[in-house]
Image (spheres, grey):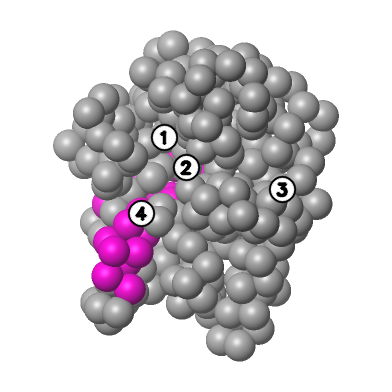
Amino acid sequence: MKLQKHQRLYINIDHVATLRQARRGAYPDPVEAVSLCLKGGADGITAHLREDRRHIQDDDIERLGTMAGLTFNLEMAATDELIGLALRLKPHEVTLVPERRQEVTTEGGLHVAGHRTHIAEAVARLNDGGIKTSLFIDPVPRVLDVSREIGAAAVELHTGTYAHAPNDPATLQALRDAARHGASIGLAVHAGHGLAIDNIAPVAAIPEIEELNIGHAVVGRAVFVGIEQAVRELRRAMDDARAGS
């Protein structure tokens, strides 16, 4: 496949909110990070409104969703409450993700086949509302097939297994195979979870992957260099990987 010149970078600002919620105060405000992320080279912003509201809050989503000109990806579970919120705010994109209250972070992809009817209904409602819908899934060809069958426009490949074992060739090959298959059946292919400056290059070089969603590593690096510089470093690493592949 011909390599797309520009690979989109969406910065997940959840963990700016995590710092704020440690004190339940007003600072740092994750929405204030938006302009700095964009200045550093991000193409858009991602935020995950969890059912337990552990970091991003409803007010954050309201402000992000009404920010003029912002390309915004809302991550959320496929619940009636959150679908209603998305239909009202009309973000550029919604990514449906699994949630378990006890998990520290999202630990795997949606069980699309096992919850096919429920997810298909959610996708249909979002599609009818004119919202591009993506499903956060494990890099498994059959799961991509089902995602396409139920009407998703895109998938985000869960890169957590790769991030935990980047030196295992099988973890990267699974992403390459899934990305190739997804593109071949008409899905837009995104990726994210556990990606950082030291492991991003092989994933960024996969030609079918149009977009990366990265958050924790950026916020962690920002503690030392600031979020604009952290995004700029990541953007440069992605661009170098694309240019050298």
Front position in the image: 224 or 33: 224
**Is residue 130 or residue 88 the one in the foreground?**
88
Q: Which residues are magenta?
A: 143-166
Instruction: Give the labeled residue for mark 2.
Output: 134
Between the C-alphas of marks 2 and 1, the distance is 6 Å
Mark 2: which amino acid?
Answer: Ser
Circle 4 residue? 158
Circles 3 and 1: CB atoms closer than 8 Å: no
Find numbered disc 2 in the image and state the secondary structure of the residue it sits on: strand
Label 3 and label 4: CA atoms lie apart by 23 Å
Q: Which residue is mark 1?
A: 96
Q: Mark 1 and mark 4: span between their CA atoms?
A: 12 Å
* Residue 241 in sight here: yes
- What amino acid type is highlighted by mark number 1? Leu
Q: Which residue shows up at 27% across the image and 47% down it?
A: 108
Q: Nearer the viewer, mark 1 or mark 4?
A: 4
Image position, residue 106 (x, y; %): 32, 41
Disc 3 marks which residue?
37
Q: Residues within 10 Å of mark 4 (few under 14, many from 20)?
A: many
Looking at the image, is 164 positioned above or below residue 227? Answer: below
182 drawn magenta: no
Observer-nearest residue: 183 or 95? 95
> Residue at 57% of width from left, 56% of height from top?
221
Q: In terms of sequence position, does the residue under pointer 2 or pointer 3 come before the other? A: 3
In this picture, residue 200 sits left or right of residue 45: left
Rendering coords of residue 129 (x, y %): 58, 23
- Quick one: label 3, few (<14), some, or many (20+) residues within 10 Å? many
Q: What residue occupies the far bottom of the structure in this picture?
A: 244
Q: Secondary structure at mark 4?
A: strand
User: Regarding mark 3 in the picture, which secondary structure is present there?
Assistant: helix
